[in-house]
Image (tube, grey):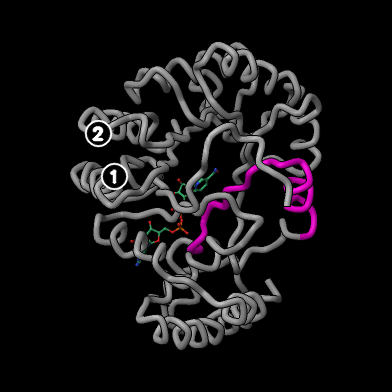
Amino acid sequence: MTTSKIAFAMPKFGLGTNKVGGHNLFPNLKDEDGYAVIRQALDSGVQLLDTAFMYGKGRSEEIIGDVLQDYDRSQVIIATKGTQDPARGFKPNNSPAFLTQAVDDALQRLRTDYLDIFYIHFPDADTPKNEAVAALQKLKQAGKIRAIGVSNFSLDQIKEANQDGYVDIVEDNYSLVHRGLEKTTLPYLQAQGIGFVPYFPLASGLLTGKYSAEDGAKFKQFSAAQYQQIMTALVQVRTIATAHEATVAQVILAWYMRNPAITTVIPGARVPEQVVANAAARDVALSAAEYAQIDQLFGEF
Ligand SMILES: NC(=O)c1ccc[n+]([C@@H]2O[C@H](COP(=O)([O-])OP(=O)(O)OC[C@H]3O[C@@H](n4cnc5c(N)ncnc54)[C@H](OP(=O)(O)O)[C@@H]3O)[C@@H](O)[C@H]2O)c1
């Protein structure tokens, strides 16, 4: 395994915060729950918070910034993202001028003077990706960001962005039921020492085991046969979980933490109870045989 290019230690476990202040993305969110989720995470020793401008158009970052005033900033890795340009109807803008302003705006909302990771959230249609990343490299040299990330980039776009070797970390959709990146992108990232953070690790709750056979219509990305296959696999995962006195979600999260291709797993949480439950996955140590069994159970995805 190559060493990661990231200049600081990345924890295996973090928190996804799109349900913290993400009123534009999810119905019926309460700001008070968002504040409680962040406090609970920091009180539980969660060391990385993954946010973005798009989560509440700045609201998620503001909530995190408020809470951080009561904690030691140096103990938390803050990852945020930007690209959605209000002047383009919130479509992506990767121009150097826009990204430079986006970082300054994020610093203000987060009430901090540096971002540990800044991701270009989505590629735009026209900016050469190495030019976009070169703008972030300048911000890194200026001390405003510590690591450069890209998200939702194809492998070709990642390679273009990484022409000068400046990309430190990639975030993309990956889970045990969405494994397409394993054949293409993940080997490139590992060879280059670029970190990888999967989003939707719990497949938006499906991999917690809380849904049943009747809920298939909620997950339209899967055919009826695939959904049935996931339900069957989760029965086996539950057996492993019982042996560890753990939950299905904890075992699934422990699988990612044991996976050498994954830098940090960032399950999202709507309420503090989910933070506590998920953070306990750090205590679940899967054996090599259990790791391989889970790998195989979801082998066709
Ligand atoms: N870069 C990108 O473009 C991008 C895109 C998407 C997400 N992300 C990031 O990735 C993070 C993770 O993705 P995600 O949060 O969308 O999906 P996820 O981690 O797959 O699922 C999180 C959701 O599952 C449910 N859940 C979590 N823990 C649970 C538990 N212990 N028991 C029962 N239900 C539980 C909660 O939803 P309910 O309670 O509502 O069921 C929670 O919001 C996000 O928070 C965000 O930071 C990035």
Horizontal and vertical percent position of residue 284: 43, 70
Mark 1 element type? helix
**Residue at point 60%, 68% (across, down):** 177
- C-alpha separation, residue under disc 2 versus residue under disc 1: 8 Å
Residue 198 shown in magenta? yes
For the residues labelled 2 and 1, say whether their Cβ atoms are less than 8 Å apart: yes
The residue where tag 2 is placed is: 71
Image mark count: 2
Quadrant of the image occupied by residue 113: top left
Within-10-Å neighbours for mark 2: few <14, some 14–19, many 20+? few
Q: Which mark is residue 175?
A: none
Horizontal and vertical percent position of residue 239: 46, 88
Residue 225 shown in magenta? no
Disc 2 marks a residue whose amino acid type is Tyr
Provide the residue span drawn in magenta: 183-203
Q: Residue 200 vs residue 126: left or right? A: left
**Residue at point 63%, 83% (across, down):** 225
Disc 1 marks a residue whose amino acid type is Leu
Horizontal and vertical percent position of residue 139: 57, 15
Horizontal and vertical percent position of residue 137: 64, 18
Asked whether residue 224 is in view, the answer is no
Up/down of 240 relative to 175, above or below: below
**Residue at point 23%, 44% (across, down):** 39
Camera-side residue: 281 or 223? 281
Q: Which mark is residue 42?
A: 1
Quadrant containing ligand 1: bottom left
Say whether disc 2 or disc 1 marks the residue closer to the N-terminus.
1
